[in-house]
């Protein structure tokens, strides 16, 4: 059983230092008129269980592109990518979709909650898609309690504040117990107080659940508070 399968089965999280992600020479080139636009020019990255890493960079530098590739939402033009030891780029689209749903969590700048469903139902969605026994209800309830929303489970997104909606989105990202959680400007639409609360939540979850967080952000305070930080410049990633 792989590390990620072990965690999903409810067993203890792997020890710190267990490899979670290994990316080598990740390149992404897009057609541009009669030429080509190289957005990523050879990114190398290693992430281990329980680490938190912030990647900063100017707007348009390719942070979201890199996150989409590392999260298997897009395929690179060239390079290799392993998540929990699996060569994910060798998987066909169907297998990759299943792997992603079970083993990678996402938190985006916009919470993307389904407005017609309650907070609890939104958090349960990935588990329902994967046909997890019980629809993941117990996990979802536990996570909503952990993110401070015990009394808001039956509320729909329109009845929640922006900070509360983003906490629901974080709980949804964790319901399948992924080792790897990717966040793209998770506090970009929140006020200062809600942002600070979300940042504290992410750090606490990494410490208590042994999950690995990779956060793309413009927020220097958030970057400084995580275990590691790096900057994406001219298609290449430099790590502190």
Image (tube, rainbow, N blue to C red):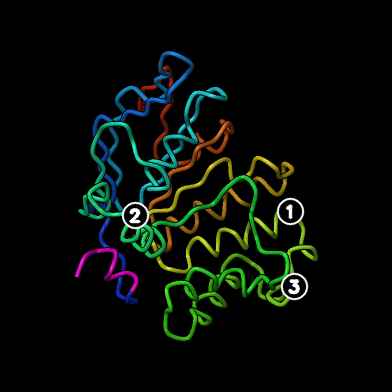
Q: Nearer the viewer, residue 206 or 189?
A: 189
- 93 vs 174: above or below: above
Within-10-Å neighbours for mark 1: few <14, some 14–19, many 20+: some
Q: For the point 34% across and 71% down, which residue is it?
A: 8
Taking the image as shown, residue 104 lies to the left or right of residue 157, namely left
Q: In front: mark 2 or mark 1?
A: 2
SS for dot 1:
helix
Q: Nearer the viewer, residue 11 or 221?
A: 11
Residues shaded magenta: 1-8
Q: Which mark is residue 162?
A: 1
Mark number, residue 235? none
Residue situated furthest front in the rendering:
34
Q: What residue is shown with label 3?
A: 155
The residue under label 2 is 93
Quadrant assignment, res 99: bottom left
Q: Quadrant of the C terminus?
A: top left
> Residue at position x 46%, y 34% from top?
65
The N terminus: image quadrant: bottom left
Q: Quarter of the image holding residue 100?
A: bottom left
Residue 29, percent from left and from top:
38, 25
Q: Give the image location of residue 43, x and y in percent.
A: 31, 29
Q: Determine the CA span between mark 3 and mark 2.
A: 35 Å
């Amino acid at each position: 059983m792989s590390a990620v399968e072990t965690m999903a089965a409810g067993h203890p999280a792997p020890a710190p230092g267990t490899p979670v992600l290994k990316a080598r020479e990740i390149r992404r080139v897009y057609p541009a008129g009669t030429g080509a636009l190289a957005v990523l020019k050879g990114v190398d990255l290693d992430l281990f269980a329980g680490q938190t890493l912030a990647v900063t960079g100017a707007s348009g530098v390719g942070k979201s592109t890199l996150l989409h590739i590392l999260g298997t939402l897009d395929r690179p033009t060239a390079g290799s990518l392993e998540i929990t030891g699996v060569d994910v780029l060798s998987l066909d689209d169907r297998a990759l979709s299943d792997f992603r749903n079970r083993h990678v969590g996402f938190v985006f700048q916009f919470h993307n909650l389904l407005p017609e469903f309650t907070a609890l139902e939104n958090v349960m969605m990935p588990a329902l898609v994967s046909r997890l026994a019980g629809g993941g209800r117990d996990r979802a309830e536990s996570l909503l309690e952990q993110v401070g929303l015990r009394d808001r489970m039956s509320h729909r997104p329109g009845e929640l504040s922006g900070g509360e909606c983003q906490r629901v989105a974080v709980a949804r990202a964790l319901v399948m117990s992924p080792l790897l959680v990717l966040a793209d400007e998770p506090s970009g639409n929140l006020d200062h107080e809600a942002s600070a609360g979300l940042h504290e939540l992410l750090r606490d979850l990494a410490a208590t659940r042994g999950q690995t967080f990779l956060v793309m952000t413009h927020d220097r305070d958030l970057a400084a508070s995580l275990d590691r930080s790096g900057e994406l410049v001219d298609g290449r990633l430099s790590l502190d």
